[in-house]
Image: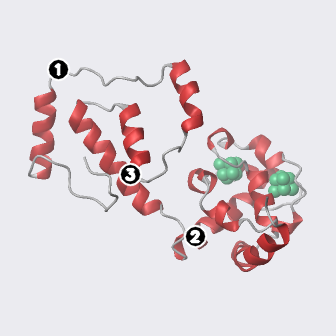
């Protein structure tokens, strides 16, 4: 259970920083939900915009900074234009991202490098991307084993990805291309994760 007074107190300095830099008052949010209902990317978020605002109000800043919402927000400003309280929601999210980066709280860079590494290894191994094994290896490398696990039934039902790797004719040729690009048989080494090939 969340200890509300503790999270508000602990999160207050970072919330104040986000408010100061964005020029917005998080506390003015009415929780009407209009920002969420107009957000084009809400389906891909873990927390819709109005919930993100509420999380800031109650001091759950770390969760906001680490959220998929903060990573995936398109900064399209639709939410900001629709807010009845004239809160620049997109600006709040953008500022949260910047604060997180400066404080070293987001591991985006490392995760992006890992994503790229696993992507390239997967293409080299199979000749084209095999999403299932790539995502499993990426989750393992980032130590987020259950990341997006709830989407698996939906993905399988829609047949967007396949359980087994594709059969590709010119696999040798693909590997030769990788060798020529990298100067050796393997993609360049990337950050330490404990998840070797
Ligand atoms: S539209 Fe504005 S007031 Fe309504 S929930 Fe979103 S941020 Fe809060
Ligand atoms: S700025 Fe971000 S949160 Fe706002 S509507 Fe666009 S994608 Fe959604």
Asked if the residue at tag 2 contacts the one at tag 3, i.e. Cβ–Cβ closer than 8 Å, the answer is: no
CA gap, disc 3 and disc 2? 22 Å
Q: How is the image coloured?
A: secondary structure
Q: Quadrant of ligand 1?
A: bottom right
Q: Which residue is mark 3?
A: 141
The residue lying at 44 percent from left, 46 percent from top is 139
Residue 181: x and y, percent?
A: 14, 48
Along the viewing direction, whichever of 105 and 1 lies nearer the viewer? 1
Return the mark for residue 169: 1
Question: Nearer the viewer's eye, disc 3 or disc 2?
Answer: 3
Q: How many marks?
A: 3
Q: Which residue is mark 2?
A: 100
Q: Is residue 19 left or right of residue 164?
A: right
* Mark sitting earlier along the chain (3/2): 2
* Mark sitting earlier along the chain (1/3): 3
User: Secondary structure beneath disc 1?
Assistant: loop
Q: Is residue 104 left or right of residue 29?
A: left
């Amino acid at each position: 259970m969340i200890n509300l007074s503790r999270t508000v107190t602990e999160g207050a300095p970072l919330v104040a920083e986000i408010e100061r830099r964005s020029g917005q008052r998080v506390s003015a949010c009415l929780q009407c939900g209009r920002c969420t209902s107009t957000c084009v990317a809400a389906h891909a978020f873990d927390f819709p915009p109005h919930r993100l605002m509420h999380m800031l109000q109650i001091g759950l800043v770390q969760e906001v900074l680490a959220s998929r919402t903060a990573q995936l927000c398109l900064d399209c400003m639709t939410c900001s234009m629709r807010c009845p309280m004239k809160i620049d929601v997109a600006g709040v999210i953008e500022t949260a991202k910047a604060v997180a980066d400066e404080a070293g709280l987001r591991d985006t860079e490392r995760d992006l490098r890992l994503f790229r590494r696993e992507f390239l290894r997967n293409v080299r191994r199979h000749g084209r991307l095999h999403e299932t094994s790539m995502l499993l290896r990426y989750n393992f490398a980032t130590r987020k084993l259950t990341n997006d696990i709830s989407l698996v039934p939906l993905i399988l039902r829609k047949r967007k990805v396949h359980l087994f790797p594709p059969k590709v004719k010119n696999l040798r040729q693909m590997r030769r291309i990788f060798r020529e690009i990298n100067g050796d048989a393997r993609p360049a080494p990337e950050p330490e994760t404990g998840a070797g090939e």
